[in-house]
Image (cartoon, rainbow, N blue to C red):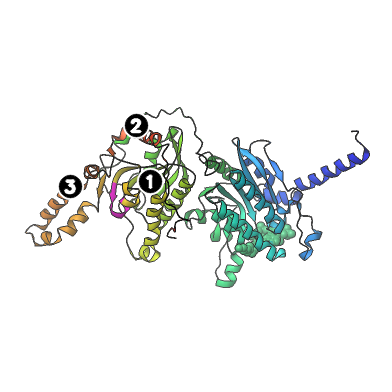
C-alpha cells in the first residue's frame, strides 16, 4: 500500500510519542540521576541485557488516577520500564523503576506493569530481575498504591523457589518498596547511592527523636554488614549489574532445570600439594577457609554471598569440573568459625536457595560448636540454630561434606553430617570429630579424679591426651560409617569432582505433605 500523508502523520505521532517516553522524566531529571552517579532506567536495562535483546512491554501505559492532578501530569511508562530480554543468551524478565518520574513511586498502573512481568516470568520459567529506585508507595494514589504492593508481594512469594528473583537496589527504596526485594532471593546494593528503610530519617526523628542520615539508617554498608538484608555490596550501577549477570551464570532458569555448566581448562585431577600444609595442626590457630576454596574450585573462582555479614561462616557459588556448587564453610579466621544466630540464618537461607534450584551443596567443616552465652540464648540461638538442622535435612540436592579439622558437638551434626542427609562425608587426616575439644572433655568427665589426684596437672594432661588419642582424629567416625573416606588433602579437587559427578543423577522423593514448618 502506498504511504499517504495520513499514514506518515500517524507514524510521526508514534515517533514523537516514543521519543517522549525514551526521554524518561526529562533531560534535567536524567542529568540529576547522572549527577548522583546513578544511571537512568533504560541505561540500566541496556547494561544488564545482551545487546538489542530488550523487548519492551507497556511503554505507553499511564496512570488512571485523577487524584492531585495526576491526570494532568505526563508520567511516561508510569515510572517503570518493563520487558523481556536475554543475559548471556538466556531469557529473563526485567523491570526498572524510573526515579526521574515522580521519584519512581509506585502507583496502580506501575504495579500492574510489574505484576505482568512477574506473571510472565513465572509462566515462562525464567528469572525475574528488579532494578529498583523508588520513593515507595505513590502517596497521591492512596489505596491503589498499597494494593499494588500487595499484588507484587503475592507474586514474589508465589514465585519463590520456582524461578530465581534478584533485586538490585540502585537508589532509594523507601516504605513498601523494601518488602518486595526482601522476599526475593538476592539483594544487590550499591555502596553510596542506595538505601533501604521502612521509614526515612524525618519520621525517625519525629517519632524517636533520633538523628540519623539516610546512609546510616539504611545504606548499602549497613544492610550488607549489620542487618544482613542485602547479599552483595557493590561500588555503583555498573558493578551491581555486573554482579547480577555473574550471579545468574550459576543459577538455572527455574526449579525445573539444572544449573548451567561451564567448561574449564582447570583439570579436575589437579593435585594441590599446598593443601597439605594450609590448615594449622594446632586447633586454636586460625586460617582463611577461602584459601582452601580457591585451591579446590575451577580457576579459583568463587562468588561469595553475604561477604560482610556473619563472616564466621562463608557461603557462595563456585564450580567443580564445570558443575555449579553452593559452598558453605566455617571460617576459622572469625570467632573460630563458631555458629551463632547470624551464621545460622545466613547459611540456612543460602542452603534453601541452592536446594530450590538444583545446586549441589559442598560443606567444609571446621567448627568448635554453637556460640554459648546469654546474648545468643536470649536472642534465640535455639530457634535460629534449628534452621540449619532443618534446611540440611530438608535439602534433596546432592550433599557432600568435607571435615577439615574440628567438628564438635551439635555443630558437627548441624554442618551436614551423615545423618542430616549428607550423601558423602569425607575427612582430612587432621579432622577431629567429638562431642567437644579434648581439654574441655577431660575437665568434665575426669573432674573428680583430677581434683583428688596428687598431681592434678599431670593427671589432667594424661586424660586430655587419652581423649585426644581416642577422638581427635577421623578414624572413630569412619569406623562407624559417619565418615565415608579419609583423603589426602592434595587430592581434594579430584575426590570432590568424582563425588559430585557420581551424585549427579541422585533424586529423592520427599514425604507427602503440604509444606514443612521451618523454625523462623
Ligand atoms: C509520590 C514521590 C514519592 C512518593 C518521592 N516522590 N517519593 N511522589 N510518592 N512516595 C517525588 C517527589 O515529590 C519529587 O517530585 C520526586 O519524587 C523526587 O523526590 P525528591 O524528594 O526530590 O528526591 P530526593 O531528595 O532524592 O529524595 C528521595 C526520597 C524522598 C528519599 C525517596 O523523596 C522521600 O523521602 N520520599 C518519600 C518516601 C516515603 O516516605 N515513602 C513511603 C511511602 S509509604 P518532583 O515533582 O519534585 O520531581 C509506603 C508504604 C507502603 O511506601 C506499604 C506497603 C506494604
Q: Residue at x 74, y 47 (%)?
A: 59
Q: Visible in this render: residue 113?
A: yes
Quickly name the residue at label 1: 329
Distance from Cα at disc 2 to Cα at disc 1: 19 Å
The spot of residue 373 in percent (x, y) is 33, 63
At x 75%, y 45%, the residue is 22
Q: Quadrant of residue 447?
A: bottom left
Q: Residue at x 81, y 59 (%)?
A: 72
Q: Secondary structure at mark 1?
A: strand
Residue 91 spot, x, y in % from top left: 61, 39
Residue 37 shows in this picture: no
Q: Quadrant of the N terminus?
A: top right
> What residue did someone put label 3 on?
470
Calculate the distance from the C-alpha at mark 1 to the C-alpha at mark 3: 26 Å
- CA gap between label 3 and label 2 equals 30 Å
| Nearest to N terminus: mark 3 or mark 2 | 2
Please provide the residue range marked out in magenta.
Answer: 406-412
Q: Which residue is mark 2?
A: 272
Q: Are marks 3 and 2 in contact (CB under 8 Å)?
A: no
**Regarding mark 3 in the picture, which secondary structure is present there?**
helix
Q: Secondary structure at mark 2?
A: loop
Foreground mark, 3 or 2, reads 3
Q: Quadrant location of ligand 1?
A: bottom right
Taking the spot 55% from the left edge, 41% from the top edge, the residue there is: 253
Amino acid at each position: 500500500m502506498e504511504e499517504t500523508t495520513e499514514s506518515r502523520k500517524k507514524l510521526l505521532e508514534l515517533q514523537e510519542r516514543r521519543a517522549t517516553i525514551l526521554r524518561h522524566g526529562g533531560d534535567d531529571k536524567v542529568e540529576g540521576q547522572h549527577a548522583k552517579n546513578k544511571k537512568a532506567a533504560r541505561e540500566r536495562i541496556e547494561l544488564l541485557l545482551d545487546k538489542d535483546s530488550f523487548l519492551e512491554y507497556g511503554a505507553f501505559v499511564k496512570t488512571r488516577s485523577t487524584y492531585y492532578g495526576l491526570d494532568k501530569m505526563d508520567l511516561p511508562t508510569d515510572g517503570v520500564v518493563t520487558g523481556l530480554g536475554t543475559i548471556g543468551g538466556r531469557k529473563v524478565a526485567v523491570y526498572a523503576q524510573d526515579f526521574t518520574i515522580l521519584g519512581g513511586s509506585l502507583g496502580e498502573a506501575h504495579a500492574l506493569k510489574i505484576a505482568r512481568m512477574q506473571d510472565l516470568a513465572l509462566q515462562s520459567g525464567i528469572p525475574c530481575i528488579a532494578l529498583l529506585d523508588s520513593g515507595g508507595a505513590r502517596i497521591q494514589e492512596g489505596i491503589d498504591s498499597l494494593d499494588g504492593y500487595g499484588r507484587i508481594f503475592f507474586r514474589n512469594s508465589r514465585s519463590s523457589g520456582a524461578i530465581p528473583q534478584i533485586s538490585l537496589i540502585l537508589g532509594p527504596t523507601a516504605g513498601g518498596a523494601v518488602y518486595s526485594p526482601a522476599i526475593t532471593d538476592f539483594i544487590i546494593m550499591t555502596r553510596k547511592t542506595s538505601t533501604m528503610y521502612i521509614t526515612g530519617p524525618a519520621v525517625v526523628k519525629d517519632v524517636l527523636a533520633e538523628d540519623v542520615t539516610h546512609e546510616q539508617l539504611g545504606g548499602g554498608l549497613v544492610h550488607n554488614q549489620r542487618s544482613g538484608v542485602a547479599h552483595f555490596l557493590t561500588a555503583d550501577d555498573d558493578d551491581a549489574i555486573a554482579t547480577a549477570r555473574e550471579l545468574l551464570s550459576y543459577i538455572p532458569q527455574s526449579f525445573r532445570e539444572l544449573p548451567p555448566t561451564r567448561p574449564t581448562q582447570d583439570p579436575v585431577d589437579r593435585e594441590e600439594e599446598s593443601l597439605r600444609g594450609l590448615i594449622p595442626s594446632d586447633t586454636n590457630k586460625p586460617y582463611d577457609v577461602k584459601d582452601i576454596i580457591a585451591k579446590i574450585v575451577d580457576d579459583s573462582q568463587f562468588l561469595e554471598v553475604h561477604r560482610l555479614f556473619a563472616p564466621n561462616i562463608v557461603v557462595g557459588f563456585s564450580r567443580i569440573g564445570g558443575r555449579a556448587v553452593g559452598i558453605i564453610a566455617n571460617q576459622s579466621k572469625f570467632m573460630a568459625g563458631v555458629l551463632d544466630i547470624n551464621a545460622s540464618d545466613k547459611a540456612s537461607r543460602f542452603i534453601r536457595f541452592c536446594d530450590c534450584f538444583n545446586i549441589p551443596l559442598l560443606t567444609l567443616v571446621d567448627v568448635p560448636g554453637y556460640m554459648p552465652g546469654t546474648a545468643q540464648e536470649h536472642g534465640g540461638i535455639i530457634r535460629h540454630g534449628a534452621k540449619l538442622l532443618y534446611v540440611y535435612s530438608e535439602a534433596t540436592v546432592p550433599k557432600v561434606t568435607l571435615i577439615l579439622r574440628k567438628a564438635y558437638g551439635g555443630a558437627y551434626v548441624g554442618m551436614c553430617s551423615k545423618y542430616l542427609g549428607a550423601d558423602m562425608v569425607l575427612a582430612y587426616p587432621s579432622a577431629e570429630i567429638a562431642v567437644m575439644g579434648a581439654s574441655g572433655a577431660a575437665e568434665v568427665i575426669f573432674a573428680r579424679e583430677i581434683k583428688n589426684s596428687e598431681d592434678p596437672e599431670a593427671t589432667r594432661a594424661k586424660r586430655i591426651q587419652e581423649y585426644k588419642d581416642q577422638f581427635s582424629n577421623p578414624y572413630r567416625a569412619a569406623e562407624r560409617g559417619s565418615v565415608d573416606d579419609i583423603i589426602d588433602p592434595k587430592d581434594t579437587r579430584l575426590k570432590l569432582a568424582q563425588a559430585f559427578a557420581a551424585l549427579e543423577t541422585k533424586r529423592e522423593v520427599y514425604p507427602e505433605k503440604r509444606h514443612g514448618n521451618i523454625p523462623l
